[in-house]
Image: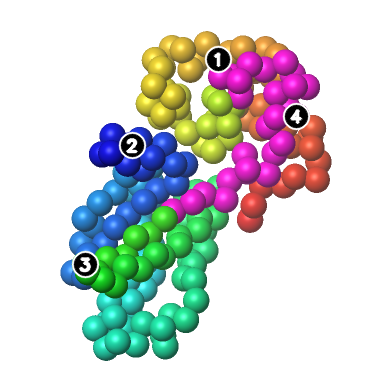
C-alpha cells in the first residue's frame, strides 16, 4: 500500500505540500521539492493556512471558508501563473494540504496534433512537453528517469523533425503553428 501511495504522490503532475497547525511543512512530494527549489512559496499560502487553523480552533471554518479555497499567482521568474488549492482536514489530526499546479504554455498547445504533424515519438513528445514547461535537460532526465544524454538525443530529434535549431526557435515555431495560442500573461 505504501508503494502505491508513494507512486501516486510522486507521479501526479502537481506539487503537494502538507502543513501542520504550526505552519510547518510535514510532507512534500517530488514535484513540490522541485517547485520550492525554483520559486519561493508565496506568503499568501502561509497566511491562508494560519487563517484556516484559527477558524478550526474557533469552530468557524465553514463560516470563514464556505467553499473551495484557491490562490492564483504569477511568480517572479516564472513564465506562467500557478494555482494553489487548499484542502483541509479537521479530524482526527488537523492539517492543510496545498496542491500546486502550473498553468503552463504547454497545456494550451495540442501536443497530440503536434506529435502527429511532425511524426514525433511519444517519448519525444514527453521531452517536448517538459521543454515547454521550462524544465532544464537535467530536470527532464530526472522526471523521465533517463540520462541527460538521452534527453539531448530526443531533443535533437525534435529539433530536426520540426526544422529548428534551438529552444527559442522551437517555441516560436509552435506558437506560429497555432496562432490562437498565446503564452499566459
Q: Which circle's residue, 4 or 2, is located before the other in the chain?
A: 2
Image coords of residue 110 (percent x, y): 72, 36
Q: Position of residue 123 (x, y in %)?
A: 56, 19
Which residue in the structure is indicated by mark 1?
Answer: 154
Give the residues drawn in magenta, as a range: 100-125
Camera-side residue of 141 and 75: 141
Q: CA distance from mark 4 to mark 2?
A: 32 Å
Q: Nearer the viewer, mark 3 or mark 1?
A: 3
The tag earlier along the polypeptide, 2 or 3, is 2
Residue bearing the label numbered 3: 93
Q: Is residue 96 left or right of residue 107?
A: left
Q: Is residue 72 rendered to the left or right of residue 59? A: right
In this rendering, the answer to whether 84 lies above or below 113 is below
Q: Residue furthest front?
A: 1
Q: Quadrant of the N terminus?
A: top left
Of marks 3 and 4, the one in the foreground: 3
Neighbour tally class for label 3: few under 14, some 14-19, many 20 plus, Cα within 10 Å:
few
Is residue 15 left or right of 26 when viewed as pictured?
Answer: right
The residue tagged 2 is: 4
User: How much space separates mark 4 and mark 1, taking CA atoms?
Assistant: 18 Å
Residue 37, located in which quarter of the rendered image? top left
Q: Residue at x 29, y 49 (%)?
A: 28
Task: State if disc 4 and disc 3 touch (CB < 8 Å).
Answer: no
Amino acid at each position: 500500500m505504501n508503494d502505491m501511495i508513494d507512486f501516486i504522490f510522486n507521479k501526479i503532475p502537481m506539487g503537494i505540500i502538507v502543513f501542520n497547525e504550526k505552519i510547518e511543512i510535514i510532507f512534500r512530494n517530488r514535484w513540490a521539492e522541485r517547485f520550492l527549489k525554483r520559486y519561493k512559496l508565496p506568503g499568501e499560502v502561509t497566511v491562508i493556512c494560519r487563517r484556516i487553523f484559527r477558524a478550526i480552533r474557533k469552530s468557524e471554518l465553514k463560516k470563514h471558508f464556505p467553499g473551495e479555497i484557491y490562490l492564483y499567482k504569477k511568480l517572479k521568474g516564472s513564465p506562467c501563473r500557478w494555482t494553489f488549492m487548499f484542502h483541509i482536514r479537521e479530524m482526527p489530526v488537523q492539517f492543510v494540504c496545498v496542491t500546486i499546479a502550473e498553468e503552463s504554455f504547454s497545456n494550451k498547445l495540442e501536443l497530440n496534433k503536434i506529435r502527429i504533424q511532425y511524426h514525433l515519438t511519444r517519448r519525444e513528445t514527453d521531452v517536448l512537453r517538459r521543454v515547454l514547461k521550462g524544465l532544464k535537460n537535467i530536470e527532464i532526465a530526472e522526471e523521465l528517469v533517463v540520462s541527460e544524454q538521452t534527453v539531448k538525443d530526443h531533443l535533437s530529434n525534435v529539433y530536426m523533425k520540426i526544422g529548428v535549431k534551438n529552444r527559442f526557435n522551437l517555441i516560436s515555431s509552435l506558437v506560429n503553428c497555432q496562432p490562437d495560442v498565446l503564452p499566459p500573461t
